[in-house]
């Protein structure tokens, strides 16, 4: 009975994890280069909106698969373009990164709903076709692992996992990754070694915007199906997952999956007799309280990039 | 000192100007007449005494959340948790208002105090975690926002469920409302309530704490340089906790002003936007209590006029939020504006100086062409 339950919950948990994972990865790029990006939430909303607009416009004239693909690509680009605002403020102008990020969040939320309301009147944008869940051929027949990981999967899940692997390789096995991380640890030293700190940070923030935009689009095409102006704090949760995962790709995978599982359990608790007895207030608050506890344990000896949040000042030692 | 204040005004006015400009562009892009839009936006907030009252009532929670963010800022803390603190303050006020069958003069002070305490408690947690375990207050206050959100989401329907809807609380009785008859009559049936006067009192108190007390001096010292403050014998940890508690209390009062003043019941499933607007208010007001007050009135005007504008034109009401968000962005990049101003000033000075004889080094540089 328990096994059956786990088999049922797992695909939902993964579906919920993936947008968080890709957004947290975006945060990883940005923070590793030394720029705190609290605007992830807003950048997700931008991707959410762009994909909804693209798909709703094109799905009747093009085939749904093409429309969804285009929606994902354009959302990624829109996230990157919007994050330029954050890069400009926090890298070029040395503005307070947290305030700039907050402005991004407010701006994204306001402008997208403004435009959506102008377009549809209600402020919501509905799409007719989402992604279809598929079983992975051959692999889904493996006992235990098959039902958990390879049945009822979205293609975006595999895309995001591929990006995760790629990111790990990029950050830890290439000169580019080393330079990017150097900018987040000791930008003055990186500069002395001939690295253009400003350019690196721009690239990193753009990558974070692209990832968050993709994350927002994935929410739309997998479980939301409708743009409604908010991603309900997922961007902030991604930021917490980044800290929980101690700024490492694999750590982030674990942390986001924990959030995904916890949220799914809270959402389906009513249908499960054993969990229905636990008051919802505990289940819903569980991920946040655990995050606070984890922060308590990790914050004393934090692995945070040393220069994260500090504007780069060339003259400083 | 005078010059500094002048600068802050310039930055604030510039940010407002650019924000309104961005709003105009947004209206143009969506095929609306910006002049007409702004006319209805502002007349919607100022047209008659009722609407002026509504503008002040809309501004009231913003004054509180703005004070909350600004106060924490002065101690070097970034309080994104005003929304959650406001929710808990509102929950405490609503709960007592629905439970205690006391007469109004006795009940109101208790409600207001409870809201402040609830908010202070919600500020205490991040403050304590920051002081004790060095947990970053930004992430912590965000988590506290969601904990407040889900707590209200379950507590309100469980104990204070409304007569018709699952998603809101019962209406609070007249005795528990900050609205009073004479004020409502004075403003011809507007939403204005005692919260506005409590807000003015709070502005005065916060200004007093910051500028006239040892506590305020210590808080600011910790904000400028924690290590230096500690070296001077100031207990940084104690001040961080206190600062977050006072900030939380301000936001909690905002919850009372909104949920038992402006509104008369609590909706679940909403994080109050005033919490985040408070950040914009604090920034625009340059973190000074009276600056916060004026900025909140301005944003209140935008928010209370947007409905009328939406009724008279086709401009969606989110234009107000877009303008506010643009203002916060430009206020955050005030460094740029400041730099731009300095560069212009330098150029002007350089132009004035050309009449004076140049010193040899400058002459040499001019020959090489390296002045700039």
Image (cartoon, coloured by chain):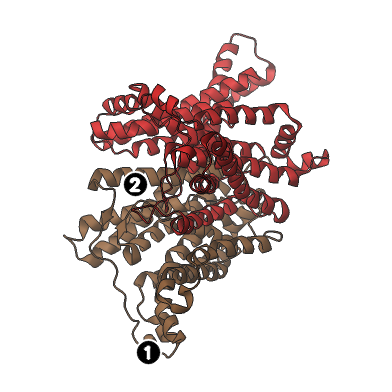
Res. B240 image quadrant: top right
Q: Left or right: B38 with respect to A193?
A: left
Circle 1 residue: A141
Query: In the rendered view, would you say B302 is above or below A1?
Result: above
- Horizontal and vertical percent position of residue B330: 48, 34
| Same subunit: marks 2 and 1 | yes
Residue drawn at (29%, 72%) of the image? A132
Q: Earlier in the sequence, mark 2 or mark 1?
A: 2
Tell me, what hue is chain A? brown
Q: Mark 2: which secondary structure?
A: helix
Circle 1: is it few (<14), some (14-19), or many (20+) Cα within 10 Å?
Answer: some
Q: Which mark is residue A112?
A: 2
Q: How many marks?
A: 2
Decide which of B339, A113 is in the foreground and name it: A113
The answer to whether any part of residue A85 appears in the image is: no
Q: Secondary structure at mark 1?
A: helix
Q: Nearer the viewer, residue A24 or B128?
A: B128
The red-tinted chain is: B
Q: Is residue A75 above or below residue B317?
A: below
The x, y position of residue A129, in whole percent, is 24, 65
Residue at the image position 22 percent from the left and 62 percent from the top: A128
From the viewer's side, name the closer residue of B308 and B13: B308
Image location (x, y in percent) of residue B265: 42, 45
The chain identifier of the residue carrying mark 1 reads A
Distance from disc 2 to disc 1, alpha carbons, whole Å, reads 43 Å
Q: Is residue B353 above or below residue A65?
A: above
């Amino acid at each position: 009975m328990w096994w059956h339950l786990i088999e049922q919950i797992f695909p939902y948990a993964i579906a919920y994890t993936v947008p968080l994972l890709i957004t947290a990865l975006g945060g990883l790029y940005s923070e590793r280069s030394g720029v705190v990006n609290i605007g992830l939430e807003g950048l997700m909303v931008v991707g959410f909106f762009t994909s909804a607009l693209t798909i709703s416009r094109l799905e009747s004239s093009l085939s749904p698969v093409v429309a969804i693909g285009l929606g994902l690509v354009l959302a990624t680009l829109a996230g990157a373009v919007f994050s330029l605002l954050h890069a400009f403020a926090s890298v070029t102008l040395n503005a307070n990164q947290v305030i700039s990020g907050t402005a991004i969040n407010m701006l994204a939320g306001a402008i997208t709903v403004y435009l959506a309301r102008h377009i549809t009147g209600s402020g919501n944008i509905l799409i007719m076709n989402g992604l279809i869940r598929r079983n992975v051929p051959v692999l889904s027949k493996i006992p235990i692992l098959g039902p958990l990981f390879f049945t009822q999967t979205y293609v975006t899940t595999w895309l995001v996992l591929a990006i995760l692997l790629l990111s790990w390789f990029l950050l830890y096995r290439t000169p580019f990754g080393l330079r990017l991380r150097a900018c987040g640890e000791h930008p003055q030293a990186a500069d002395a070694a001939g690295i253009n700190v400003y350019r690196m940070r721009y690239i990193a923030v753009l990558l974070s915007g692209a990832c968050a935009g993709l994350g927002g689009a994935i929410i739309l095409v997998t479980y939301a199906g409708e743009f409604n102006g908010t991603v309900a704090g997922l961007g902030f949760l991604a930021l917490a997952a980044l800290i929980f995962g101690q700024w490492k790709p694999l750590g982030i995978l674990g942390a986001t999956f924990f959030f995904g599982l916890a949220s799914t359990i809270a959402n389906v608790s009513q249908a499960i007799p054993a969990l229905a007895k636990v008051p919802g207030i505990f289940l819903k608050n569980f991920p946040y309280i655990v995050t606070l506890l984890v922060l308590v344990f990790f914050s004393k000896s934090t692995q945070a990039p040393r220069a994260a949040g500090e504007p780069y000042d060339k003259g400083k030692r | 000192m005078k010059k500094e204040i002048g600068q802050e005004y310039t930055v604030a006015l510039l940010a407002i100007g650019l924000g309104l400009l961005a709003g105009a562009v947004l209206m143009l892009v969506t095929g609306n007449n910006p002049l007409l839009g702004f006319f209805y936006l502002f007349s919607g907030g100022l047209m008659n005494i009722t609407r002026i009252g509504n503008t002040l009532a809309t501004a009231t929670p913003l004054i509180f959340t703005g004070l909350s963010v600004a106060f924490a800022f002065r101690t070097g803390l970034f309080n994104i948790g005003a929304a959650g603190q406001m929710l808990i303050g509102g929950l405490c006020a609503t709960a007592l208002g629905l439970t205690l069958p006391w007469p109004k003069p006795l009940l109101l002070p208790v409600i207001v105090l409870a809201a402040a305490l609830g908010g202070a408690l919600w500020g205490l947690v991040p403050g304590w975690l920051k002081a004790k375990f060095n947990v970053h207050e930004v992430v912590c206050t965000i988590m506290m926002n969601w904990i407040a959100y889900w707590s209200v989401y379950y507590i309100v329907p469980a104990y204070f469920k409304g007569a018709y809807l699952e998603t809101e609380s019962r209406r609070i009785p007249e005795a528990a409302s900050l609205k009073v008859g004479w004020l409502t009559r004075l403003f011809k049936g507007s939403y204005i309530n005692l919260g506005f006067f409590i807000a003015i009192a709070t502005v005065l108190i916060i200004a007093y704490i910051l500028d006239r007390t040892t506590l305020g001096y210590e808080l600011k010292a910790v904000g400028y340089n924690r290590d230096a403050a500690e070296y001077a014998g100031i207990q940084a940890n104690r001040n961080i906790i206190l600062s977050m508690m006072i900030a939380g209390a301000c936001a909690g009062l905002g919850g009372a002003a909104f949920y038992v003043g402006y509104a008369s019941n609590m909706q679940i499933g909403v994080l109050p936007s005033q919490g985040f607007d408070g950040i914009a208010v604090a920034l625009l007001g340059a973190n000074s209590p009276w600056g916060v007050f004026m900025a909140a009135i301005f944003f209140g005007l935008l928010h209370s006029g947007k409905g009328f504008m939406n009724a008279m034109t086709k401009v969606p009401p989110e234009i107000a939020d877009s303008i506010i968000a643009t203002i916060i962005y430009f206020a955050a990049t005030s460094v740029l504006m400041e730099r731009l101003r300095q560069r212009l000033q330098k150029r002007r000075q350089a132009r004035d100086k050309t009449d004076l004889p140049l010193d040899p080094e400058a002459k040499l540089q001019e020959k090489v062409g390296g002045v700039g």
